[in-house]
Image (cartoon, rainbow, N blue to C red):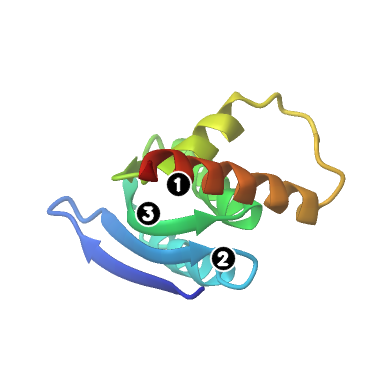
Amino acid sequence: MPLDIFVNKKETGDPIFVLAGAVDAETYSELEKEIENALLESPKNIVLDLARLQYISSMGLSVLVKAEKVLQGNKGALILINLPPQIKKVIDVISSLPSMNIFKNMEEADAYLLKIQRDEVEKNSL
């Protein structure tokens, strides 16, 4: 599934990224590049509007974590808005995990994330 990225600016100059599609092993680098370019302008915050995001893999999550660390170092924040239920569920689960490696490889991590997201979509479609 492709990833569409639309970038707008808030009145403060902070970028707003609107994501549609999937951030997976094939598309995460597109998001990473766009965020890195935005970070060159030293924004205080970056906003990600995820209303149209259908899936995020472990690679996509790593892009978010990396951006968050940079922004926190600048006393700013990565702000996520309009999370679909399956994306919110994955972020909730990942943020509650202990900081140790619980997957044997990337494929296992992505299979786990896919199952969580599919289960949440099914639950919300009933």
- Residue 51 to residue 65: above or below: below
Residue drawn at x 17%, y 50% as measured from the top left: 12
The residue that label 3 is drawn on is 42
Name the front one of labels 1 and 2: 1
**Marks 1 and 2, the one that precedes in the sequence:** 2
The residue that label 1 is drawn on is 121
Residue drawn at x 38%, y 40% as measured from the top left: 124
**Marks 3 and 2, the one that precedes in the sequence:** 2
Residue 23 has which mark? none
For the residues labelled 1 and 2, say whether their Cβ atoms are less than 8 Å apart.
no
* Residue 78 appearing in the image: no
**Viewer-nearest residue: 93 or 60:** 93
Residue drawn at x 45%, y 38% as measured from the top left: 123
SS under mark 2: helix
Residue kind at label 2, given as amino acid type: Tyr
Choose top left, top right, bottom left or bottom right for residue 60.
bottom right
